[in-house]
Image (spheres, rainbow, N blue to C red):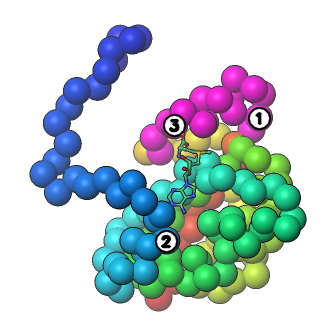
């Protein structure tokens, strides 16, 4: 797409935007209803006393496991060193997802985002995790 032009493709008819807290939506979703989920550059909440606000957290991990189909993919990206360490630690302690180490270059099929572009501009290296929902 030429620089400065908007992508005006019509979204598919089932496309919806939820502009509220994603955790409220998650709680109301049925079991095993998603083939894929993306968590792109979530707020890092870098202060230790705010750690419980981080989206990658045991309660949300349980919810993500519940709404994803067995074998489905949960993709998470972060450029923040505190969050990178946190995800590595928290996902290393759970057994609901296969959680291999992250890629350091954006894997094929991931969409670029504004915060990713900001990270590149400011010299940070995003981590890209691909978690697979265990049965
Ligand atoms: C660092 S920005 C990243 C935005 C975008 N994903 C990107 O990569 O450019 C984090 C975004 O997450 C949103 N956010 C934080 N907590 C949320 C929640 N519980 N539910 C939905 N959105 C949330 C914030 O409002 C903010 O827009």
Horizontal arrangement in the rendering, residue 90 relative to residue 97 (left or right): right
Which residue was labeled with disc 2? 23
Q: From what the image shows, is residue 5 above or below residue 55?
A: above
Report whether the residue tagged 3 is closer than 8 Å to ligand 1.
Answer: yes
User: How packed is label 3: few (under 14 Cα within 10 Å), some, or many (20 or more)?
Assistant: few
Q: Of callouts 2 and 1, which one flags the residue occurring earlier in the amino acid sequence? A: 2
Q: Of callouts 3 and 1, which one flags the residue occurring earlier in the amino acid sequence? A: 3
Report whether the residue tagged 1 is closer than 8 Å to ligand 1.
Answer: no
Q: CA distance from mark 2 to mark 1?
A: 28 Å
Report whether the residue tagged 2 is closer than 8 Å to ligand 1.
Answer: yes
Q: Is disc 3 in contact with disc 1, using a CB cutoff of under 8 Å?
A: no
Which residue was labeled with disc 1? 124
Q: Residue 77: in sight, yes or no?
A: no
Horizontal arrangement in the rendering, residue 52 relative to residue 20 (left or right): right
Q: Is residue 21 magenta?
A: no
Q: Within the image, what quadrant is residue 82 found in?
A: bottom right
Q: Residue furthest top?
A: 3
- Element under disc 2: helix
Give the magenta-colored segment's residue range: 110-125
**How far across and how far down the image is residue 87, in percent?**
73, 65
**Residue at image location 72% in from the left, 44% down from the top:** 79
Which residue was labeled with disc 3? 113
Q: Residue furthest right?
A: 48
Q: From what the image shows, is residue 41 above or below residue 63?
A: above
Q: CA distance from mark 2 to mark 3?
A: 21 Å
Q: Of callouts 2 and 3, which one flags the residue occurring earlier in the amino acid sequence? A: 2
**Residue at image location 65% in from the left, 29% down from the top:** 118
């Amino acid at each position: 797409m030429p620089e400065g032009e908007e992508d005006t493709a019509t979204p598919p008819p089932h496309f919806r935007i939820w502009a509220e807290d994603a955790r409220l939506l998650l709680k109301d979703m049925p079991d095993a209803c998603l083939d894929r989920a993306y968590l792109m550059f979530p707020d890092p909440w870098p202060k230790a006393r705010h750690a419980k606000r981080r989206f990658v957290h045991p309660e949300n991990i349980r919810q993500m496991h519940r709404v994803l189909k067995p074998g489905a993919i949960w993709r998470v990206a972060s450029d923040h060193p505190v969050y990178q360490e946190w995800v590595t630690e928290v996902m290393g302690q759970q057994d609901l997802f296969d959680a291999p180490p992250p890629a350091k270059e954006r894997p094929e099929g991931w969409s670029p985002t504004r915060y990713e572009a900001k990270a590149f501009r400011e010299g940070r290296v995003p981590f890209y995790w691909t978690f697979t929902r265990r049965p």
